[in-house]
Amino acid sequence: MTRFEELLEGKLAGELSPDENQEFAALLVLAENRRAFERHQQTVALLTSVERQVPSSSFTEDVLARLPDRKSRPLEKLWEFLWAPRVVRWNVATALALGLVLVVAVLARTLPSQSPVSSEMRSVVTLFRFTLDAPGAQQVFLAGDFNGWRTDEISLADATGRGRFSVTLPLKPGRYAYMFVVDEATWVTDPRAEAYRDDGFGNKNALVDVEAPTVGNGDT
Amino acid sequence: MVVEALRCNSTVSGASKEQGSTGCEVPSHARLESDPVDEQAIIARCLAGEGRAYAVLVERHKVLVHDLVSRMLGDSVEAEDIAQDAFVKAYLSLRDFRGESRFSTWVCRIALNRCKDVLRKRGRAPWARSRREDGPEPAEVADDGETPVDSLERCEREAALHRALARLPVKYREVIVLRHIEGMEFHEIGRVLGIAVGAVKVRAFRAREMLRSLVQSEEAPR
């Protein structure tokens, strides 16, 4: 691409600086350049005069109709059952019975629990350590679907000072996609990930599967 | 909540045009950038299972995506289906959308990939079933004081342009459509196509040169 062509592209985009504008004006002294500029201006004018083709009025509804349900069917049915309006008939005896149930429930809650299952066991997570070797990097962050792909939230520490950045996260069972963000700009796929998935831009997101619902340690 | 958002964003889909710095008209819709934070929130709702939230994103970008596909395929009927496909595919891959670019950039890339698939399968020149190929439908004649002769000339010019676009190689066609019809910035086109900004500019320049001679050959009496 010649300098004139480069400036012409900038001129058409309205991106030239005052100095570049002057340089471009000087190049237009040549009749050949002037003709080229006019040709391109006319082509742009022709293209931008084209009217947009509008989709049908049912376009959005049609797209929504083609989407699969993300909720599972039984859950959805339960949800609809819970929220469906219905007529409830009552009398004093029913109200008294309900009141009695409530009193019993409150009393039962105030008594010491006999259950052998502790709350600790119910909220078991797996501790997962994410590690990236990035010698020379100033800072490394972890972003994934577990934190809405926020790039400024989970910082990795270089404990050894030799460019090995790591962080340990408590994760509930499930499959998570993640990437490292080096020096706020470069997205890096974990080279040691268990699996990968296309991100739609030609790169790959790393995947981690957290399966065992017991306290333990994983290492990427 | 969705209905409210749809109403707020209905102006984004408009096809109005305004004067550019070089005296050429540029599509104003391209400058209406959607709020990325707002988009992330909508995407989070979609991922939580609220499929209706996706309607906001579709409403916001449907004109862009549909028009892009329509120009690439030269078939406004098929464009409807392929553009919808692109939105469905984007929805299914929402988990992998990291928010590095705008949602519109991402869905345009998906749409262009679908177009290339279709063109490959088709294996022949596009424009086969375009409704606009043989001139405008009666309802498309402008009513802003344009005489029937002006209207006919405008339609013939547009038809010649569309035929010329269809003959342009795909790698030039996609740049010219994104840049001059959809009004995207160079860096955004680079992201959509996965090429450097410099390469986008080179292609845009060459594409206009090629398009001009193709339009002239289309307009020449046979």
Image (cartoon, rainbow, N blue to C red):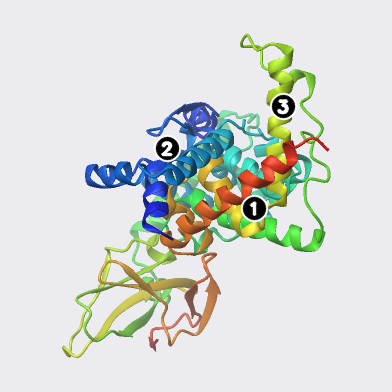
B86 or A33, nearer to the observer? A33
Q: How many marks?
A: 3
> Which amino acid is tagged 1?
Ala
Q: The disc numbered 2 marks a residue on which chain?
A: B
- Name the spot of residue A191 as percent of width and height, x first: 43, 85
Residue placed at 51% from the left, 42% from the top?
Answer: A40
Indicate the quadrant containing the C terminus of chain A: top left, top right, bottom left or bottom right: bottom left
Contact (Cβ within 8 Å) of mark 3 with mark 2: no
Indicate the quadrant containing the N terminus of chain A: top left, top right, bottom left or bottom right: bottom left
Which mark identifies residue B86?
A: 1
> Which amino acid is tagged 2?
Arg
- The extreme top residue here reads B145
Residue placed at 41% from the left, 81% from the top?
Answer: A190
> Which amino acid is tagged 3?
Cys
- Name the spot of residue A211 as percent of width and height, x first: 51, 80
Q: Which of the two labelled residues, at mark 3 and mark 2, occupies the earlier sequence position?
A: 2
Which mark identifies residue B31?
A: 2
Residue bearing the label numbered 3: B155
Provide the secondary structure element on which disc 1 rests: helix
Is A28 on the left-hand or right-hand side of B145? left
- Name the spot of residue A172 as percent of width and height, x first: 43, 72
Which of pointers 1 and 3 indicates the residue nearer the eye?
A: 3
Please tell me how crowded label 1 is: few (under 14), some (14-19), or many (20+) other residues with Cα within 10 Å: many
A214 or A100, nearer to the observer? A214
Which of pointers 1 and 2 indicates the residue nearer the eye?
A: 2
Label 3 to label 2: alpha-carbon separation: 27 Å
Contact (Cβ within 8 Å) of mark 1 with mark 3: no
Please tell me how crowded label 3 is: few (under 14), some (14-19), or many (20+) other residues with Cα within 10 Å: many
